[in-house]
Image: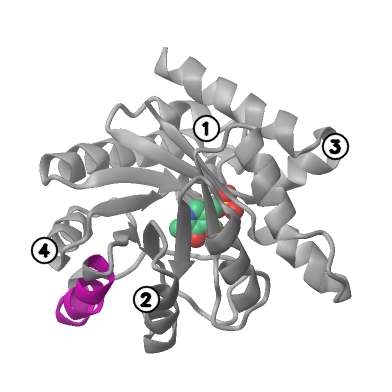
Amino acid sequence: MLRLGVNIDHVATVRNARGTPWPDPLRAALLAEDAGADGITAHLREDRRHISDADIARLSEALKVPLNLEMAATAEMQAIALRHRPHAVCLVPEKREERTTEGGLDVAGDLARLTDYIAPLREAGSRVSLFIGHDPRQIEAAAQAGAAVVELHTGAYCDLDTEGRLADRDAELAGLAEGARLAASLGLEVHAGHGLTFDTVGPIAAIPELAELNIGHFLIAESIFTGLGPAIAEMRRRMEMARG
Ligand code: PXP
């Protein structure tokens, strides 16, 4: 079965644009839960541009489905994760100026530090996931670092599709499929996400090693027109269709 994690960050983006309590990301998360989300993902960024510390506390308290806390591998974020002990922690690279998470983590270049960083999170009971590209060096390093999960970055695949660069897109898809095979062979659970839409989700969902997709921006955008429940239901339908 392929799980769908719904990322509710951009409900908080809209809220923070006006400094009001609404729209409330917790309300969106509970609605997503009712609509069949298998998990909720929230990215607590260092600059708190969308999700806040209070959001993480409320989500931890109220959710029935697992919470996947996305965060940079900093001391501050580790302390927060150890306080809330979410089901999963997904470590992502973070640059203050970026609009969204642009690339994957350089696990191979930061192996000793990340190995030490992951250990207490594991001991606290969180499944640690590393957000990486499909480069075999990074996948092998993720296994060495003690991660339980890798999340493969689908952003480049989605951008190439939008730009109509179909040969490059298909090469990227082949790389993702190869990466998923390697990760699974090393005993890692394999997730994928970033930039996925109704148009791009099918070929990614068809990669048999994948256990979970994390999707946010498109679902929140689509919910303006159809509501969040129907947007999630349609995404699930396309995921299931791809699995046959
Ligand atoms: N996975 C990870 C690790 C991410 O950082 C993000 C974006 O926060 C997503 C998935 C979801 O990406 P999108 O919002 O483009 O669907």
- Near-viewer residue (138 or 87): 87
**Residue 115 magenta-drawn?**
yes
| Mark 3 surroundings: few (<14), some (14-19) or many (≥20) residues within 10 A | few
Residue 74, position in %: x, y?
38, 84
Q: Are marks 3 and 4 in contact (CB under 8 Å)?
A: no
The residue that appears at 28% across and 71% down in the rendered structure is: 121
Q: Secondary structure at mark 4?
A: helix
Q: Could you give the CA–CA distance between mark 1 and mark 2, rounded to whole angstroms? A: 33 Å
Q: Secondary structure at mark 1?
A: helix
Q: Which residues are magenta?
A: 109-122
Q: Could you give the CA–CA distance between mark 1 and mark 3, rounded to whole angstroms? A: 19 Å
The disc at residue 201 is 1
Q: Could you give the CA–CA distance between mark 4 and mark 1, rounded to whole angstroms? A: 29 Å
Is 30 above or below relative to 8?
above
Residue behind label 4 places its C-beta within 8 angstroms of ligand 1: no
Q: Could you give the CA–CA distance between mark 2 and mark 3, rounded to whole angstroms? A: 38 Å
**Residue 99 magenta-drawn?**
no
Determine which residue is flagged by label 4: 144
Q: Are marks 1 and 2 in contact (CB under 8 Å)?
A: no
Q: Secondary structure at mark 3?
A: helix
Residue 51, position in %: x, y?
64, 69
| Mark 2 surroundings: few (<14), some (14-19) or many (≥20) residues within 10 A | some
Q: Amino acid at mark 2?
A: Leu
Residue 146, position in %: x, y?
16, 63
Determine which residue is flagged by label 2: 82
